[in-house]
Amino acid sequence: MLQGETFAAQAESIGALRTQLLSQHLREGRRALAILSPDDKAGSAFVAVNLAVSLAQAGIKTLLIDANMRAPSIQRMIVPPRGTSGLRECLETAGSDFGDIIQDDVLPHLSVIYAGEPSSNAQELLARPQLNLLVDLCLREYEITIVDTAPSNNCADAQLLATLLRYALIIVRKDDSYVNDVRTLIADLRANRVEVTGTVINET
């Protein structure tokens, strides 16, 4: 497939996903979505970024959070306008000013919280009360908050975030992700009362 055709197909797929979210997620009052993947090959960050940008382009006040503090990647796709201090630094310090880590209007209608420096104790940080306070703020201030997470087969970070946000979208990669891993992930999410809004097959 030619490069232009590939881009057009990707844009169409993201557009269809945006339409589904607008009709079945936002209109029902749901304001957050965790993006999960069973492995590090699925490309969850790619989908999270493109979905957030697409929603912002539709005029939706959107916040994108890179919660993969083990291997942050969103800063490579959307270059931070001012440093990369972010979620890790906020969760490490009690009483942090959340406004310091929210980079507003990175693009029109799009704000970003970057992961910050990689962390070896990400699960411990995500279990701290500051995260609940931050999520509460995000749900009040933004129409939709998209949260990228670490691969679920390596750690419990994604499960923690999905349980907090209550809604999850699963990303798998064609010919790479294992069906049993996806089934296990879905079963674990449902056991924690997380609603799985759908599964996206990433072919990029």
Image (spheres, rainbow, N blue to C red):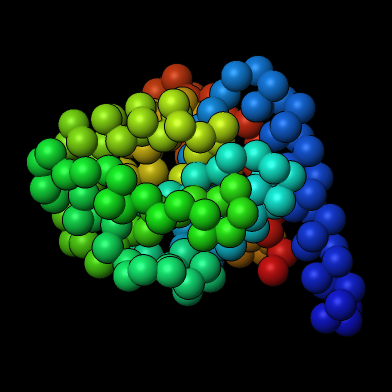
Q: Quadrant of residue 68?
A: bottom left
The residue at the point 89 percent across, 73 percent down is 5
The residue under the point 53% across, 70% down is 77
Q: Viewer-proximal residue, 193 or 118?
A: 118
Q: Nearer the viewer, residue 128 or 110?
A: 110
Q: Is residue 153 visible?
A: no
- x, y percentage for residue 78? 52, 68
**Residue found farthest to the bottom:** 2
Position of residue 100 relative to residue 8, above or below, is above
**Lateral position of residue 173 relative to residue 131, left or right:** right
Q: Can residue 11 be seen by looking at this rendering?
A: yes
Residue at 11% across / 48% down in the picture?
A: 93
The answer to whether 135 is drawn above or below residue 114 in the figure is above
Could you say which is closer to the camera, residue 67 or residue 174? 67
Left or right of 113: which side holds 204?
right
The answer to whether residue 55 is left or right of residue 44 is right
Q: Position of residue 33 (x, y in %)?
A: 53, 36
Q: Residue extending furthest left?
A: 94
Q: Residue 158 in the image: x percent, y percent?
A: 39, 44
Residue at image position (36%, 68%) is 82
**Quadrant position of the C terminus in the picture:** bottom right
Residue 62 in the image: above or below residue 7: above
For the N terminus, which image quadrant? bottom right
Residue 121 x %, y %: 17, 55
Q: Quadrant of residue 85?
A: bottom left
